[in-house]
């Protein structure tokens, strides 16, 4: 187990380490960095600095071993800052999901692959350079690299995209509990789409951002927890966890307690075997990390 340490972390409330046992090789599959020196794309919200040293402190507090940087919408297709963070944090223990132009050159895809990129993100919750129309053509191109498409989409768009995603020759990763809306939760059309994609062996889903769609709210996010439990029971081999640090959808004075969220996630998952799969085995399989020795 990686040693955990109490202490204040930027953009995370609380100071305690998680109570849950965090296994060696535990992987945070969704976090970002922000840097005031890098201009944000017009129309996107600004987030204050949240840099590598801050994330290292979070990783130490939670006892994590590995991580996956996710290019935020604020930086569009300028992946340079996150590629720098990937290098700084260490490519052996980290991977990245990028955002690219729809007509990105093959040479650029190969360059990103060599740098540690393993997927392309489609954030369809807001206007951006990548749209739903780009999912199929880009998905076909990146399949040869062993990459995946990472989709963050509101319910109507996710449901409409289901046949497209089901036919892709590459894996599909669904952000933030599949953006399953509340209070409908497991009875929603989005949950049905997520379940069918999981059942078809096509999708992976991240237990991340439980606050994004929750109506129950903090601190328990019980409605999101019920969705997480249902997903864990449906597809234990396709479950991932992400901190979503520094929680860009949450205002600065309402950042969640990451250790508490991790403990709640452990309770939602229930089984120590599933917990290890979600934190260690499943990320190793998807992102190409070496198997943990534990």
Image: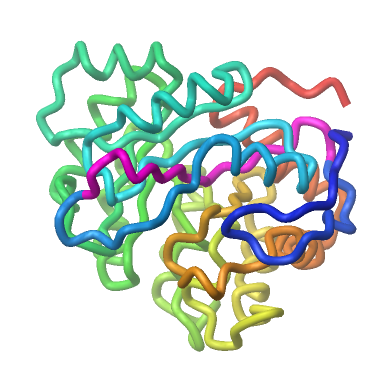
| Left-right relation of 264 to 13 | right
Quadrant of the rendered image containing residue 249: bottom left
Task: Mark yes or no: residue 192 visible.
Answer: no
Q: Which residues are magenta?
A: 23-40
Q: Is residue 203 magenta?
A: no
Task: Mark yes or no: residue 115 visible.
Answer: yes
Q: Is residue 14 above or below residue 96?
A: below
| Left-right relation of 65 to 29 | right
At x 87%, y 55%, the residue is 20
Front one among 205 and 22: 22
**Quadrant where the N terminus is found in the figure:** top right
Quadrant of the rendered image containing residue 52: top right
Q: Position of residue 260 (x, y in %)?
A: 76, 65
Q: Position of residue 98 (x, y in %)?
A: 34, 34
At x 31%, y 58%, the residue is 46
At x 54%, y 63%, the residue is 209
Q: Position of residue 289 (x, y in %)?
A: 63, 22
**Quadrant where the C terminus is found in the figure:** top right
């Amino acid at each position: 187990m990686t040693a955990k340490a109490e202490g204040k972390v930027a953009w995370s409330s609380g100071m305690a380490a998680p109570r849950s046992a965090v296994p060696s090789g535990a992987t945070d599959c969704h976090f970002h960095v922000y840097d005031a020196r890098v201009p944000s794309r017009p129309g996107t919200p600004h987030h204050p600095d949240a840099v590598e040293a801050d994330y290292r402190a979070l990783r130490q507090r939670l006892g994590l071993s590995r991580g996956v940087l996710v290019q935020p919408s604020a930086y569009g297709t300028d992946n340079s800052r996150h590629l720098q963070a990937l290098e700084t944090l260490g490519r052996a223990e980290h991977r990245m999901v990028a955002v690219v132009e729809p007509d990105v050159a093959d040479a650029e895809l190969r360059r990103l692959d060599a740098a540690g990129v393993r997927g392309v993100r489609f954030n369809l919750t807001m206007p951006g350079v990548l749209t739903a129309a780009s999912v199929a053509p880009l998905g076909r191109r990146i399949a040869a690299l062993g990459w995946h498409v990472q989709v963050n989409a509101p319910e109507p768009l996710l449901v409409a995209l289901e046949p497209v995603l089901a036919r892709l020759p590459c894996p599909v990763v669904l952000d933030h509990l599949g953006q399953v809306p509340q209070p409908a939760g497991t009875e929603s059309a989005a949950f049905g789409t997520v379940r069918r994609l999981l059942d078809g062996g096509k999708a992976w889903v991240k237990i991340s951002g439980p606050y994004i769609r929750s109506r129950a709210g903090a601190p328990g996010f019980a409605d999101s927890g019920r969705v997480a439990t249902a997903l864990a029971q449906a597809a234990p081999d396709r479950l991932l966890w992400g901190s979503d640090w520094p929680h860009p959808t949450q205002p600065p004075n309402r950042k969640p307690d990451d250790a508490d969220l991790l403990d709640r996630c452990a309770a939602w998952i229930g089984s120590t075997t599933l917990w290890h799969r979600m934190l260690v085995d499943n990320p190793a399989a998807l992102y190409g990390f070496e198997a943990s020795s534990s």
